Amino acid sequence: MSVQASVAKVTERIVARSQPYRSAYLARLEHARRQDVQRGALSCTNLAHGFAAFPTNDKLRLKQDKSSSVAIVSSYNDMLSAHQPFERYPQIIKDAVHAAGGVAQFAGGTPAMCDGVTQGQPGMELSLFSRDAIAMATAIALSHNMFDAAVYLGICDKIVPGLLIGALHFGHLPAVFIPGGPMTSGMTNKEKVKIRQLYAEGKIGRAELLEAEAKSYHSAGTCTFYGTANSNQMLMEALGLHLPGSAFITPNTPLRDALTAEAARQALKITDRGNQYLPVGHVVSEKSIVNAIVTLLATGGSTNHTLHLVAIAKAAGIVIDWNDFDALSAVVPLVTRIYPNGDADVNHFHAAGGTGFVIRELLDAGLMHEDVKTILGGSLRAHCAEPFLDGEAVVFKPAPAVSGDDSVLRTATAPFSADGGLRLLTGNLGRSVIKISAVKKEHWVVQAPAVVFHSQEAFMKAFRAGELDRDFVAVLSHQGPRANGMPELHALTPALGILQDAGRHVALVTDGRMSGASGKVPAAIHVTPEVLAGGPLGLVRDGDMIRMDAEQGILEALVPAEEWAQRQPLAIDLTANHVGMGRELFAMFRTTVSAAEEGATSFGLPPVLHNPEAAAHSEQPQKATI
């Protein structure tokens, strides 16, 4: 089927915009491949260090340089419920690769923090920057040049994007991502939200709240709502970097373990030593990035990916912006209802048909590019499938033809809504994004006086004092990456939800984040430029009339132009946000970070070099001609 006209137009625009950077990126990948940057480039001393601790048989394989070596890069820790299952994975991977004639080495670990633990805490100000730190740790793991391919173990918010960014900087190596799966379903999301609001109103105590939260987050595995962690897993499927349908198989089950072993064997099959060479820098292309955006929109995924997908694309020499998201959202139907865009969790979604159903529906509707490379070869159609066990072997069967529950998952021809529910807002307050897939239509337009805050704590103090029982737009400034690392602001959600339920017209405008748990309260987030980069959000004063219009794509302070031009931003002391909880160590990120619409990254696009081969051998940095 031909690709839908708007999808084709956006893709063509991205290809043209990216051409010089993408060409330079691919040239360097080919140069790295031809230079034999794996073990053949190492001296005997280098190589001896690299396999000194290996068993004799594996050491012999590496000495003879006849077997492929697979790197394991893991974000395991046993504090994150989603990452605890990864403790067992390295041995499963090593055994599978060894049985297939190769060698697997644990190349390195990366940090992994939990946004659920740090939400509303000082540690949240490290969260976004941890993505680039993870990319750096991935690069360190791969820098030994011992490897022919790599497998990556990660699930949660900044971790998968960080791993993929790191992998793309070694884009000549094949990459297979191996998920851990969600925990089994606990307390319903609807009940959890109700209890949180009761606590915020002071109607129940901390003990009752903690008991409810413990019933929601109760075992190993990913949190089951459709936040950034599970959006990551959906996008790895759409990018063709997972085995088909593997994202939402629960941990510590026979199928989960069999998929881990199969993924390791697949990594071994696609190295440059065989005839199925599939480097990750070719799998992630302009078309596959469009596929990822489309899938994000069709499933109501995390707004964090208006940052992360931009950063991932940048690492591959591809330039995307929020205009691309907005244009695609206008034509991509919403085919899922998963909390916070509905009551169901990802286990219900998987049972109803899962990722294979979604990908098939979008392909059949002409909304995704089929002609892309994946870890299975040359077509995304192979990922319209789900895995099963046949004895001890994994087999893939076509995704169900009919949804198992049309309150959770629908076809592209009978969707929940005709568009993807993500909008670009523009106006004299800058550019921002809003996710309206979980917002009732009567709240898509809010016009009310501003109440300005510079911290979550100040907002909550005003709420508890009863000062916010009215119509208003909360303007929370100085929350961008330069200011304090761009934390998520979900501590505000229960309070805003209470006010909205009481009939108040409320909204949030901020240069901070709300992420995948963005819910029923309209929120214009990621406002860029941020205040510390000269953004106009810092000009807003209490009482200014603010218009947020998600129907028309408007974000405006309704202040006379003459008065607006005379205003200066308030001087805010952010010293307290730069010390304690390790924040001093991240000062370099705050001073070098790009704008939100550029991915909020510490790295830039690949430099366009006149002679990539000469640059590779030069001892001096080459001047980029960007």
Image (cartoon, rainbow, N blue to C red):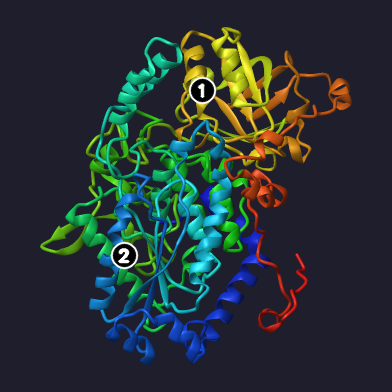
The answer to whether residue 14 is visible is yes
Q: Seen in the image, is 566 located left or right of residue 263?
A: right
Q: Residues within 10 Å of mark 2 (few under 14, many from 20)?
A: many
Q: Amino acid at mark 2?
A: Pro
Q: Are marks 1 and 2 in contact (CB under 8 Å)?
A: no
Q: Which of 580/523 is in front?
A: 580
Position above or below: 14 against 218 = below
Q: Which of 384/57 is in front?
A: 57
Residue at x 57% of width, y 27% of height: 523
Residue at x 50% of width, y 14% of height: 500
Position above or below: 504 against 335 = above
Q: Which of 180/236 is in front?
A: 180
Which disc number belongs to residue 521? 1
Secondary structure found at label 2: helix
Q: Position of residue 389 (x, y in %)?
A: 15, 58
Q: Residue furthest front?
A: 580
Q: Amino acid at mark 1?
A: Val
Q: Which of 524/186 is in front?
A: 186
Q: Position of residue 347 (x, y in %)?
A: 27, 40
Query: Which of the image's four quarters has the N terminus?
Result: bottom left
Q: Seen in the image, is 428 located left or right of residue 261?
A: right
Residue at x 56% of width, y 67% of height: 169
Position above or below: 220 against 502 = below
- Residue placed under numbered mark 2 in the picture: 90
